[in-house]
């Protein structure tokens, strides 16, 4: 498969991230490596979406702190970003609504007609009032250097923090190469872009608990989007899927990461990291990166908490 025929993927992880651990970042890395090895996908970005404060989980610290810790945890990554949209809403959002938001956001970005080098774009930056001057989402002044799909999609990642959304009716998006304007002819590329929910097998297992998830939401999450599952704590995703009619129905939309990684997925546990902090356990460095530890100590988070 060529680059343009592969499915371009953005991995989205929703959760408390209370706090975000090394294991959470490793999940992104393992998922990307596995998807690339299949030869079917190109992962162009990762999104960490911390849950709203009104989620109500015991011991959940303010989203202000959790967003900062997440940003510190991904600061050295060139492809994983933290998105505050979920935290900034008036109340808690379902996983389904968060996925739909990011799908809509991607549609608005990638659906824009990019301007010609010498012609200002008539498409306003998303979130900018219509009567204000427009800003080109992608502009390359080197005419001889034709932008590829990867370059355009790379620019999408840079734009995530300044755009919002509307609901798209399409799953395939058209890009315009701004430097391919030959008279009145422009070259179009069609690229499939998907938002996939990244999770551990524990979240997948929660789908099997009666009444915990809205069935209509499950249909959308698994049927319309798809899931990338990183097994943890010895759980067998195939066995889990057999316990849910919806998971069985959309089994082809569930990608289970299979690799030779020796990373113990127990280091994903925010609970264990909090306990280590409360007990002054030096092994906290196995769970959390140093900038996150420094921030927790400076802000006196979790130290005296029971959650």
Image (cartoon, rainbow, N blue to C red):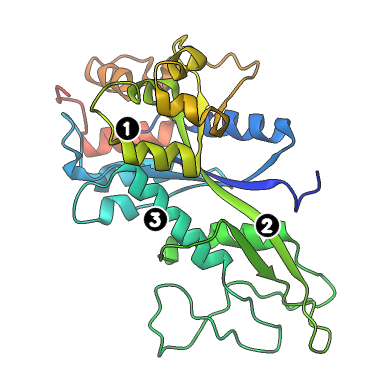
Label 1 close to label 2 by CB (< 8 Å): no
- Residue under circle 2? 191
Sequence-wise first label, 2 or 3: 3
Pointer 2 local density, CA inside 10 Å: few below 14, some 14–19, many at least 20 = many
Q: Which residue is mark 3?
A: 101
Q: Residue at x 36, y 15 (%)?
A: 282
Residue 100: percent from left, percent from top:
40, 52
- Which of the 4 image quadrants contains residue 42? top right
Residue at the location (39% across, 73% down)? 127
Describe the element under mark 3 as helix, strand or loop: helix
Can you tell which of label 1 and label 2 is closer to the viewer? 2
- Cα separation, mark 1 vs mark 3, equals 24 Å
User: In terms of sequence position, does the residue under pointer 1 or pointer 2 come before the other?
Assistant: 1
N-term mark: 1 or 3 = 1
State the quadrant of the C terminus.
top left
Relative to residue 173, is residue 96 drawn left or right? Answer: left
Q: Of the numbered discs in the image, which one, if any, rests on residue 19?
A: 1
Of circles 1 and 3, which is in front?
3
Q: Quadrant of the N terminus?
A: top right
Q: Is residue 198 left or right of residue 63?
A: right
User: Is 192 or 269 nearer to us in this picture?
Assistant: 192
Looking at the picture, does residue 248 appear above or below residue 66? above
């Amino acid at each position: 498969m060529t680059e343009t025929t592969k499915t371009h993927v953005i991995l989205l992880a929703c959760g408390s991230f209370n706090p975000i651990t090394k294991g959470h970042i490793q999940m992104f890395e393992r998922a990307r490596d596995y998807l690339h090895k299949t030869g079917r996908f190109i992962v162009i970005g990762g999104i960490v979406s911390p849950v709203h404060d009104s989620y109500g989980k015991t011991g959940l610290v303010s989203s202000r702190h959790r967003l900062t810790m997440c940003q510190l945890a991904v600061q050295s990554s060139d492809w994983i970003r933290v998105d505050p949209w979920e935290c900034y809403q008036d109340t808690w959002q379902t996983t389904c609504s968060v996925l739909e938001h990011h799908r809509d956001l991607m549609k608005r970005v990638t659906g824009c007609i990019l301007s010609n080098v010498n012609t200002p774009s008539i498409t306003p930056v998303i979130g900018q009032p219509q009567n204000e001057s427009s800003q080109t989402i992608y502009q390359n002044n080197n005419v001889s250097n034709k932008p590829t799909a990867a370059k355009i999609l790379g620019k999408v990642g840079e734009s995530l923090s300044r755009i919002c959304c509307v609901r798209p009716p399409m799953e395939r998006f058209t890009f315009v190469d701004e430097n391919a304007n030959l008279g009145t002819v422009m070259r179009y590329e069609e690229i499939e872009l998907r938002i996939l929910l990244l999770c551990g097998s524990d979240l997948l297992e929660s789908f099997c608990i009666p009444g915990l998830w809205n069935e209509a939401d499950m249909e959308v999450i698994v049927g319309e989007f798809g899931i990338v599952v990183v097994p943890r704590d010895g759980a067998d995703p195939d066995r889990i899927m057999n316990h849910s009619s919806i998971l069985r129905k959309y089994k082809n939309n569930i990608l289970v990461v299979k690799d030779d990684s020796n990373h113990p997925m127990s280091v994903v546990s925010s609970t264990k990291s909090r306990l280590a902090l409360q007990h002054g356990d030096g092994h906290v460095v196995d769970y959390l990166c140093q900038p996150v530890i420094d921030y927790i100590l400076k802000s006196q988070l979790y130290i005296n908490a029971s959650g």
